[in-house]
Image (cartoon, helix red, strand yellow):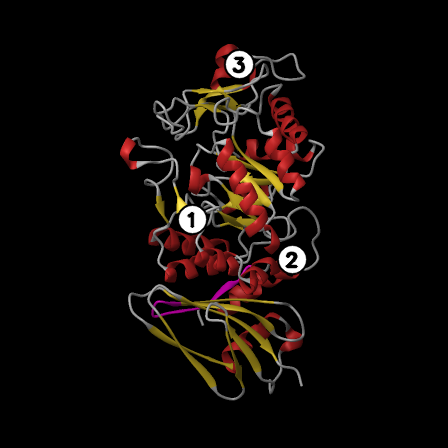
Amino acid sequence: MKNILFLILWATPLLAFTQNAKGLANKPPLGWNSYDSYGVYLHEKAAFENLEAFAQKLKPFGYEYFVIDGMWYGEYKLVPGTIYPAEREATVINIDSFGRVEPGSFYFPNGLKPLINKAHELGIKFGLHMMRGIPRQAVKKNLPVYGTEFRAKDIADTTSICSWNSQFYGVDMNKPGAQEYYNGLYKKLADWGVDFIKVDDVVPFPKEVVAIGKAIKNCGREIVYSLSPGDNTNLKDLPYYKQAQMLRITGDIWDNQSSIDRSFDAWKIWQGMATPGFWPDLDMVPFGKLQLMHLEKYGIRLSGRGFMRTSEFTQEQMRTFITQRALAASPVMISGDLPTIDDYSLALITNKDMLECNQNGNSSILVKEENGMELWLTYLPEKQIKGWAGYFNRTQKNISVTISKKELKLVSSYNSELEKEYTNDFTIKDIWNNKEYRISDGQLTFTIASGDVLFIRFEEVLH
């Protein structure tokens, strides 16, 4: 057992806390985000189609957040005669007289209000992606800051520019009017009826993390606050991050093996840190059709990875990917096109056992790592031992694992009341193969294919 005692002792207070905390995002948020399927080029027709599909395919399973990703305020140049973008980043964005973003007039000619209203009619919560800072157009025009005597040039930090989006400057939080700018911006979104806000390019800027958190907290509406991106997170900034309910802990994740590997790396750093109201986020789920606005025939390099395609994950990789999110208690944000999603992808993301594990909210810990196999374990803190485990095969060949009562008794170390000699049997459910077993004094042996996972639910049988 690699560092098992340390990990268990370290994680136990956090796990205990998760059973008592109340508030916003008390469980890992479940939803859909448009980025992997539409990049930053989602348009009104596709938005409504995905919203209807969300209501039919995801909402019955507890998914609740429908989120439009970046640049919904872009005034894009288009490939002539089409709706497809001819530029990676909109040269012009739509802003109001106070420098606050507005929906783009071509992709959202009716604004966002009809879409927000429809989402709420369907019992779905609506979310938007936002960038840190103030639009450079607002600074160039030196527009007034809403509700103050200050102007855009008074608060902008023109040296602070996102490396992958040049439309915004950072806000200098030492300047009068800076907090008021964020207050006015997020009050506007709250008045629209927004329920979820993903703020990008903000993780490395703790002062703005806090300022946006204050603005959201005081906007008059309950809004889930999500921080992005995750490739520059630092544990020392955890108190700042906890202004939000979600924290991206990886860079952009896509449908390739390197994304799965990076998810494991981030998970190891942040294991055990999920609590109600704060969820380390392994990024979106790229299942189904992706990059629908990126047609190879136009040869234009757009935001995201590659051109229009169906997810390139194998089924083994898909099972590993979604099991990571279940055991890590990560938010689950589906990001493929919902109207066309395939049956296998849909079965994985709506699997009852996967969702029960995820929504339990206890982030698993790594209890064994040997010969390319990783065992991650989480449990329900009750006198009866039960929980979930993932045996991940990270090798290039098939491997065999054995499961016995002795191994499952590891869970007893979480709780001194459970430290006893066990005589009871255990039931084991192989989740992805939908098979159930019972362990008495023997053991079960499973073969796990290269890159695949054995995902089990275990439960002590009380006599």
Q: Which residue occupies 52% across, 36% down?
A: 47
Q: Amino acid at mark 3?
A: Lys
Q: Is residue 241 among what the camera can see?
A: no
Check the picture and name the quadrant holding the N terminus.
Answer: bottom left
Q: Which mark is residue 286?
A: 1
Q: Secondary structure at mark 1?
A: loop
Residue 113's image quarter?
top right
Q: Which residue occupies 37% across, 55% down?
A: 261
Residue 149 lies left or right of residue 390; in this view the side is right
- Up the image or down, 412 lies above or below 326; here it is below
Magenta span: predominant SS is strand
- Up the image or down, 233 lies above or below 345; here it is above
- Up the image or down, 31 lies above or below 378; here it is above
Q: Which mark is residue 153?
A: 3
Q: Is residue 425 among what the camera can see?
A: yes
The magenta span reads 363-373
Check if residue 172 falls in the magenta segment: no
Check if residue 371 falls in the magenta segment: yes
Q: Secondary structure at mark 3?
A: helix
